[in-house]
Amino acid sequence: MSELGSRPEDQQKIYQRWAPVYDRVYRGLLSDGHRKLAALAAAAGTDILEVGVGTGLTLRHYPSRCRVTGIDISEHMIARAREKVRRETLQHISALEVMDAHALRFADRSFDAVCLPFVITLIPEPERALDECARVLRPGGEIILASKLGDGAGLQGAIEAAVAPLVRHIGWSSAFRIHRILAWAERRGDFSAAEILPVFPNGFFKIVRLKQRGLSA
């Protein structure tokens, strides 16, 4: 799920190259976001779906009482995540599957929380993927996103736009705006932005909690 290539075969090639070095590059940089994301998801409920699980850097942070399913478009990333689960004996991980975020193979209302750790800016059609996350979410559940999310305002917004072509090559989009996610929630009408949290380093990354309004079963 990358802006470097929207075709599945292009994405597989990109992540095949990234898989062996991903942990070394991102473990320390993203660890604060991973810990907070997992804690917020666990607070929302025990059945959790992680979209864009990658090599499984977030998996160790979920409490053992949770039942976590992880998906990723890359079979190479999933292979690394499965090895991590075996090596660290992470018994709370229910399944790790290769799957497209645009077409989740889960029944409606399957999860209490859906997490997207540092992946929303890489998905070719983020609103379509968020619709799928909403479909598999139980009433009253939460979609929780962590990413580099700017607001486009002032000098910081100008810098984000200027460096967008550069950071795209390391898998981020500095030009992806928070208001795009909030606009999606507003259009749907059944989600509200419960919280926007800054995370390390110094708020460069953010976590957005979208809470689904309770619906009749």
Image (cartoon, helix red, strand yellow):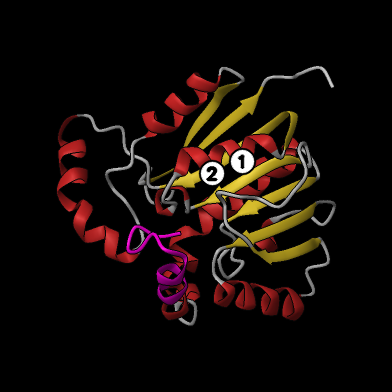
Residue 9 vertical position relative to residue 132 in the rendered view, above or below: below
Q: Amino acid at mark 2?
A: Ala
Please tell me whether mark 1 sits on a helix, a strand or a loop. helix
Q: Are marks 1 and 2 in contact (CB under 8 Å)?
A: yes
**Is residue 102 found left or right of 201 in the rendered image?**
right
Residue appearing at x 55%, y 22% in the figure: 188
* In magenta stretch: residue 13: yes
Residue under label 1, please give it.
132
What percent of the width, then of the height, locates residue 33?
Answer: 52, 51
Q: Amino acid at mark 1?
A: Glu
What percent of the width, then of the height, locates residue 70?
Answer: 68, 59
Q: Nearer the viewer, residue 189 or 50?
A: 189
Residue under label 2, please give it.
129
Residue appearing at x 57%, y 70% in the figure: 55
Please tell me whether mark 2 sits on a helix, a strand or a loop. helix
Q: Indicate the quadrant containing the C terminus: top left, top right, bottom left or bottom right.
A: top right
Q: Marks 1 and 2, how far apart in space?
A: 5 Å
**Is residue 103 found left or right of 146 in the rendered image?**
right
**Is residue 200 found left or right of 66 in the rendered image?**
left
Residue appearing at x 43%, y 62% in the figure: 29
**Is residue 170 found left or right of 119 in the rendered image?**
left
Q: Which residues are magenta?
A: 1-14
* In magenta stretch: residue 6: yes
